[in-house]
Each structure stands twice: as C-alpha cells, then as structure tokens.
Amino acid sequence: MKDLDGKNIVITGGSYGLGLEIARAFLKEGANVFTIARNKEKLDVAVEDLGRDVRRGRRVEGYPCDVTDREGITATIDTIAAEKGGIDALINNAGIVIPGYFEKVTVDDFETVLRTNYLGAVYSIKAALPHLLEHPESAVTVTSSVLGYKGIFGYGTYSPTKFALIGLAEVMRAELKDRGVQVTVLCPPDTDTPGLAEERKTRPRETEAIAGTGGLADPADVAAKFMKGFKKGKFMVIAGLAINALYRINGISPRFADYVFDSMVKKERSKRA
Ligand SMILES: NC(=O)c1ccc[n+]([C@@H]2O[C@H](COP(=O)([O-])OP(=O)(O)OC[C@H]3O[C@@H](n4cnc5c(N)ncnc54)[C@H](OP(=O)(O)O)[C@@H]3O)[C@@H](O)[C@H]2O)c1
C-alpha cells in the first residue's frame, strides 16, 4: 500500500509502546488513525500526543475497547467504518506477554495470552474484513515476533500465539491476494516499550541471558522499518538484523539455532551454580 494520504487506518494497541509509534508513522504519511486500547486515560494522552503529527484535514481518535471482547471489538470497528467513511487498513498490534517456565505458568495464563494475541486479532480481522473489501486496495497487518518462528526458553504462553498469527497471515495472504488485500507480518526485535519493561521483571534468567544478546530497539525505528516494508507491500517485515539472521539460520538449520540457545542457557546456569 503505497499512498496512505487520506486513508483510514485502525490500529489496536496504539496508546503506548510500539503501536503508538506505528500510529505516528501513519499520521506522518497523511493517514487518519483510529486507535483502540482498553485504558481510556492512556488513550486520551496518546491522542493528544499524536495530535501534533496530524496533517491538515486529517484526524486521530481513540476508541476504548478490549480486543478480547468479541462483540465490543466488532461494534467498535463497525462504528469506525460507518462514521469515518470505511477502513483501508487494520493493524493488529495489541499483545501481551506472560513469561515463565512451562512448569510454573498456569493454564489460565495460556488462555489469557491466547485470547489477546491470537483471538483478539481474529475478532478484529473478522470485523474489519467486510469493510476492507469495499475498497479496491486495503491491508491487514499482524504483529508477530521472533517467537513466531522460533520457540525460545521461557515463552511457552506467548510463542505459540505468535506462530499462530504467522500461520493465519499465510492463509489470509493466499485467500485474499486476488481481492486487493495486502497481508503483512511485522516481527519486531526486543523493543524498548512499557510492555517489555514489565515482561523483564518476571522473565526467567535464562530467557534474559538469551534476549540480552540482541540489544534493545527504539520503537520509532521499528515503526519506520515497518512502514518501509508495508509501503512496499512486503509480506514479512523482520525489523532487526539479529532476528533476521536468526530467521535465516533457523530456516536452514533449526538444530543449530537450538544448539546456540542451549549453550546460552547452559552458560547462564553455570554462572549461578
Ligand atoms: N516490545 C517488544 O520487545 C516486542 C517484541 C516482539 C513483538 N512485540 C509485539 O508488539 C506488540 C506491541 O508490543 P509493545 O511492547 O509495544 O506492548 P505494550 O508496550 O504493552 O503496549 C501494548 C498496547 O496494546 C494495548 N493492549 C493490550 N492488551 C489489549 C487488549 N486486550 N485490548 C486492546 N488493547 C490492548 C495496550 O493498551 P491498554 O493496556 O490500555 O489496553 C497498549 O496500547 C505486541 O503484539 C507484542 O507482542 C513486542
């Protein structure tokens, strides 16, 4: 999707973190942005902040809603489409992480993460697709992760939801490519957001040792890389050098990637022993 001027973009989870910077990137392209998140106060702050980047005649608005509320998200997306003259792109960004050893995380944790990261995206796409198909050119994006192509220590509840999003995106790309709907997957590296800061408080030390090797990306840089790929119509946007290398190495030899991560875990454990 090259020309975003005047396009209506719906972003879930655009009130802080990466979604906020993705919203800003769309506004800078001249789009209208309608962003959805649960906390109204934080949404209001985001809308005020983003207001500085709105081009003349364009708008940014916040819609408080939880993506796990199937009826609520459907009604919210329908309302945006009806009141704002349709939807050109849906950016699924809302996501949560509950890290922890498989033996310690609960089945409730699995369900919570699945409901937000995967089903939240399914509900949003289901609601948006009829509106997207009203336009000759439209787009759907899902936010996956390096954990969507490689299961890594400590991410039992999260990684499967990110694999699921890539699977869903592959199916949607195949089914919708002749109907003008671009499908894009964003895989951000570890990015400096409130979500990651929260996650780091509880992720296992072995996970921290692995993740620490990749550095920490700036959310605005990740959003810029996403925008570049999105405008080129790319399917997969892997927004970091180290995770791009892992994508390729894991594609050739997943056992080698396992060996590297297992060695990091072993080293971390021997330090503490
Ligand atoms: N940061 C990273 O290192 C990293 C790496 C790879 C992938 N990702 C993915 O990138 C996306 C953004 O991550 P982030 O680090 O920017 O997260 P974040 O800082 O926690 O921000 C999450 C955003 O999603 C919203 N949100 C969360 N749950 C929601 C729900 N049920 N319904 C509606 N909105 C919801 C939050 O607002 P409310 O709390 O007000 O709802 C907020 O706007 C996620 O999908 C994450 O999995 C992040």
Image (cartoon, helix red, strand yellow):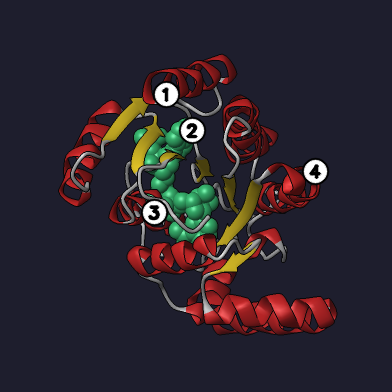
Q: Which residue is mark 3?
A: 22
**Image coordinates for residue 43, horizontal then vertical, percent:** 28, 34
Look at 21% across and 48% down and name the residue there: 55
Q: Nearer the viewer, residue 187 or 181?
A: 181
Which quarter of the picture shows residue 150?
bottom right
Q: Confirm or reject: label 2 Cβ below 8 Å from ligand 1.
A: no
Which residue is identified by label 1?
80
Q: Amino acid at mark 4?
A: Glu
Compared to residue 130, the image places residue 5 above or below, namely: below
Three-letter amino acid code at the position of disc 1: Ile
Which residue is at 63% across, 33% downward? 133
Amino acid found under the numbered disc labelled 2: Ile
Question: Which residue shows up at 59% across the image and 49% down it?
Answer: 142
Local SS, label 4: helix
State the SS at label 2: loop
- In what element is the residue under mark 3? helix
* Dot 4 beta carbon under 8 Å from ligand 1: no
> Mark 3 to mark 4: distance in Å?
26 Å
What is the spatial separation of the Cα atoms under label 2 and label 4, in whole angstroms?
Answer: 19 Å
Can residue 104 be seen by looking at this rendering? no
* Residue under numbered circle 4: 175
Compare marks 2 and 1 and give the one earlier in the sequence: 1
Q: Nearer the viewer, mark 3 or mark 4?
A: 4
From what the image shows, is residue 266 above or below residue 221? below
Q: Decide which of tag 4 and tag 1 comes sooner along the chain.
A: 1
Q: Which residue is mark 2?
A: 87
